[in-house]
Amino acid sequence: MPDQPESIAVRKLTADDAPAFQALRLAALEECPTAFGASLADERELSLSEVAQRIAPPDHGGAGGVGAYAGDALVGIACVFRARGGKERHKAYLVSVYVVPAYRGKGVSAPLLDAAIGLARAMPGVRRLNLTVNVANTAALALYRRLGFVVYGEEVEGLCVDGVYQDEYLMTLALA
Ligand SMILES: CC(C)(COP(=O)(O)OP(=O)(O)OC[C@H]1O[C@@H](n2cnc3c(N)ncnc32)[C@H](O)[C@@H]1OP(=O)(O)O)[C@@H](O)C(=O)NCCC(=O)NCCS
């Protein structure tokens, strides 16, 4: 009998997900140093309460993390936060997007990012969901384009990873 496709459950993360999120986030920073602005050293020392504040902040208007679970295993993550400046409250940012290698190409990323986009859409007054992506990250670029994000700029030398400068595209999704 052929294998049944494994069912994936995507949901908003809570403070209880902090240990699993932190393990996946550190794996992401280790595997893909050119895909993220933070370094492993930046985040290794975060406490679980700091991680919980990031994925399920009680005071930040619906911001936080979403996760894709295969059974008990967290296999994909994404976070959304809202700009805090009084003149920037119409913008939110998509960050920390990661799917573990064994689950790539299996349809996890689209519902995961749909859920993340849903968080931004539910924030009253938010008109734009922005992100940055390494210009060489073809898989992420294809995914974001498929979801409707468009490139609105390029930051030359946006990251410096182990002494090598990396250019980044700035992408935006219109929510209004
Ligand atoms: C980006 C990421 C979340 C996408 O997850 P995924 O499960 O691979 O997503 P998909 O299977 O839907 O693939 C996304 C697209 O990339 C394409 N793709 C996958 N691997 C590719 C590769 N090596 N080269 C070119 N395109 C590739 C897929 O065909 C798909 O394109 P399509 O929409 O035109 O069919 C995942 O690859 C990942 O976690 N990468 C490492 C972390 C990362 O780069 N995060 C993004 C930071 S901005």
Image (cartoon, grey):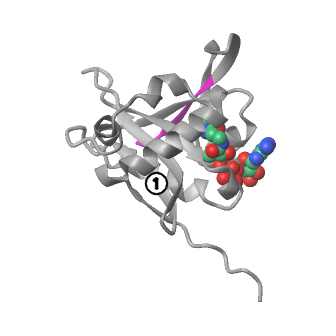
Q: Quadrant of residue 129?
A: top left
Residue 171 position, x and y percent, is: 57, 31
**Observer-nearest residue: 88 or 5?**
5
Indicate left or right for 166 with 22 as reference.
right
Quarter of the image that includes the C terminus: top left
Q: Is residue 115 above or below residue 91?
A: below
Residue at screen point 71% across, 56% down = 105
Q: Is residue 175 magenta?
A: yes
Q: Is residue 67 magenta?
A: no
Dominant secondary structure of the residues highlighted in magenta in the image: strand
Q: Kindly tell me whether residue 143 is visible in this rendering.
A: no
Q: Hey, which residue is sitting farthest bottom in the picture?
A: 1
Residue 71 position, x and y percent, is: 51, 69
Residue at screen point 62% across, 42% down = 144
Q: Residues within 10 Å of mark 1 (few under 14, many from 20)?
A: many
Residue at screen point 50% across, 37% down = 96
The residue identified by callout 1 is 67
Does dot 1 land on a helix, a strand or a loop? strand
Quarter of the image that includes the N terminus: bottom right
Q: Kindly tell me whether residue 106 is visible in this rendering.
A: yes
Residue at screen point 44% across, 47% down = 21
Q: Quadrant of residue 115?
A: bottom left
**Observer-nearest residue: 75 or 129?**
75
Q: Hey, which residue is sitting farthest left in the picture?
A: 59
Q: Is residue 109 above or below residue 141?
A: below
Indicate left or right for 127 with 78 as reference.
left
Q: Quadrant of residue 80?
A: top left
The number of numbered discs placed on residues in the rendered structure image is: 1
| Range of residues picked out in magenta | 169-176
Residue 13 position, x and y percent, is: 37, 53
Q: Is residue 110 above or below residue 172?
A: below
The disc labelled 1 sits on which kind of residue? Answer: Gly
